[in-house]
Each structure stands twice: as structure tokens, then as C-alpha cells.
Image (spheres, helix red, strand yellow):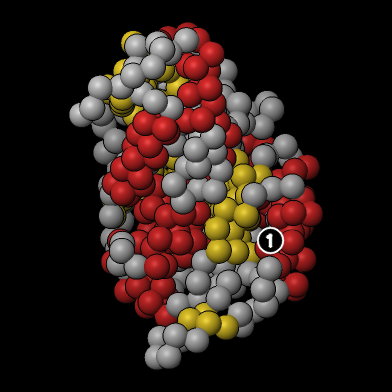
Amino acid sequence: MGTLSGPPQDSGSKTRLEHQILALPIPLAGMSLAASGCRLAIGLDGHRAAVSLVLGFPLAGARAEELRTAIGEVVAAHGCELSSLDIAIRIAAHAVQPGVDILPAIRNVIAVGSGKGGVGKSTTAVNLALALAGEGARVGLLDADVYGPSVPTMLGLSGRPDSPDGKMIEPMRAFGIEAMSIGLMVESDTPMIWRGPMATSALTQLLTQTLWGGPDGSGLDYLIVDLPPGTGDIQLTLAQKIPVAGAVIVTTPQEVATLDARKALKMFEKVQVPVLGLIENMAVHVCSQCGHAEHLFGAGGAQRMAAQYGVPLLGSLPLQIGIREQGDAGIPIVAAQPGSMAADCYRQAAIHMAAVLAGRPRSAMPIASSLLGG
């Protein structure tokens, strides 16, 4: 390597380098490192730079390498040699709605909702959970759609969960995540003919009586909650009794779907649950035979809604037969075809979602938990 020449780097130079690194986009997320609230430390020794970066969201594989390369290029353009680069992942617990205590084994509960059924909410929730796990996070998935539980089918789960003491329930595991669903407690063709209070009681029990986080006490970084469609009792129970760090709204592009998605968004706003963003499902269909792309449900509906309400559009997902086939087969597309375009779309939405959450205020934690790096 050639010898770098020029005057030693001063404090102003260090500040400029910090700003340039923090302005870098997060791979796939469409937002800057600064917006995610990451922590950056730079040590300059002449023309040698040691960079330490702490991310509050998971990032692994090609995405992490892309970020490393980008940081190296910024340092080189600044006239420095990168002597060391350390990127650490520390996912913190984030603030929840007022008057609700955080759960000890779960850092962040993220609700995935929709204003109406049929927009692919459950498929999206499952693949988001798998995408987060694939980036290195500890993830659980709670099927809160007690009237139409589909998570067991999508994850290929069957049988009853174990209960070591007759009170608490062991979550089932598939593809690197923990999962729990009322569908694991009843026969697959048994209808849930429950009134609101019984349904909400079932949801609360599934959440609080499941041994989330494993026996080592490490806990979950994220619990993705697949809500039933609409704005009824279960959604209100989630908002009033369960600590939710953020919500994601799934919609399709057409106006009739975004009208109902607006209601779900406003509901979360009224109960002081922050909306992390929108996910547009079935945005475009690409013919598997000829490659022709067509917007069967219209184009730009979620983008317009996101702009109207000032929330991010986290991602747009394709209408693709493989997504449906893999869900029916019990091997979701992110697990079955991780290198596919569809899996990349889910991965983009998951990283963007986690990065938006990372930029939000952290929860107030006891000093002991803070010292342990919770």
C-alpha cells in the first residue's frame, strides 16, 4: 500500500468523516445510518482511521459486506487508511405505548395488521420474521388471528406444543424462529366460534404463557404478531395490554384496499402505537413465461398513502405464484428460495422496518438491564 501524504487529520476532519459515514444508506433499507440512530466512533492516528459502528438492527451476509465496503470507500476518499472496522449489532428494547410494561423476554413486539382480509398479511408476517432471523436476529412469531390461524400451515408445523409444568407452553420452532398459534391447540378444521372477550383472553394467554426466548434466557429481539384483519377487539386488546414497539400495515395498491388500510393506521395512531410504515403487497405481477410486468391491482396506492400520512413505504412485494406455493407447502419463500427476487423484497422490507424501529426512542430500563446490554 502506498504511503499517504498530507497534513495530519484534525478534529474538523474527524467530524466531516463521521458525517460522511453516517450519511451512507443502509443496504436495502433506503434510509441513512444516521436515521437509524446507530452509534459511531472514529479514532484517527495521522492518516489511519479506526472505525467502530454499533447498529440497532440486524444486518448480515452480503448486506453487511456491502456496508463495510461503502465505509472503506468513504475513509479512502477522505485520504485515510482504514486500520480497523468493527460493526456490532445490539438490538435494544424500544419505547411502547404509555401505561404498558415491557415483557422481560421480548425486546420488541411488532404488530402486523391490515384494514381488511385478503391482502396477504399473514404471508407477509411469516416472511418478515424469517427475513429478520436470516439477518441474525432472535425472532418469534405469534399468530394472533385466532379466527383464521394460518401460521402453522405456512411454517409446516403440526402437533401440540409441550408444556413442561402444565401451565407454561414451549413455543414450536421452524426455520430458525419460535412460533405460537391457537391453530396448534385445536384441530385444523375446528372453527373458533368465540366472542370478543374470549378471543382476546386467548391472545393474552398465548403471549404471556409462552416461554419465549429459549431456556438460555437470551430472549427475543423481535416478536412479530400477525393480527386478524380489521380494527376490532383483538387489536384494541393488543394496544391496551400488550407492549407494542411499532406496527406495520399491509395493503395492496388498489384504492379499495388502501381505504381500509387507512383505518388501521389511524387506529394505531389513536392508541399511541407508532406506525413503522406500510408494506405494499401484490404490487406487480411478472409473467413467468414472457417476463411481462403488469400492475394487476393498480400502481402507487401505498406510496400515495405513505406520503399522505408521513410514514415510510417499507417495501413493495410481488404477486408471484411461488410465494403462494411455498406458503401452502409449509416452506415460506424466504426459506425455500433465499436468493430469489421475492425473498429479496421481503428482506428489504424487514431490514427497513427494523432500521426505522432502531431510530425510535428506547424504553426506560432498570440500571441492571442497561449494564447487561439489554
Q: Which residue is mark 1?
A: 303
Total labels drawn? 1
Image position of 35 (left or right of 207): right
Image position of 252 (left or right of 288): right
Q: Residue furthest bottom?
A: 289
- At 34% from the left edge and 40% from the top edge, which residue is drawn? 69
Q: Quadrant of the N terminus?
A: top left
Looking at the image, which is closer to me, 73 or 147?
A: 73
Q: Name the spot of residue 228 as percent of width and height, x first.
A: 59, 59
Q: Name the spot of residue 156 as percent of width and height, x first.
A: 30, 65
Q: Residue furthest front?
A: 6
Q: Name the spot of residue 196 as percent of width and height, x first.
A: 66, 54
Residue 369 visible to the viewer? no
Q: Secondary structure at mark 1?
A: helix
- At 40% from the left edge and 11% from the top edge, which residue is drawn? 8
Q: Name the spot of residue 167 as percent of width and height, x first.
A: 37, 38
Residue 349, compared with residue 238, is above or below; it is below
Looking at the image, which is closer to me, 7 or 329?
A: 7
- At 29% from the left edge and 46% from the top edge, which residue is drawn? 61
Residue 220, compared with residue 292, is above or below; it is above
Residue 356, compared with residue 316, is above or below; it is above
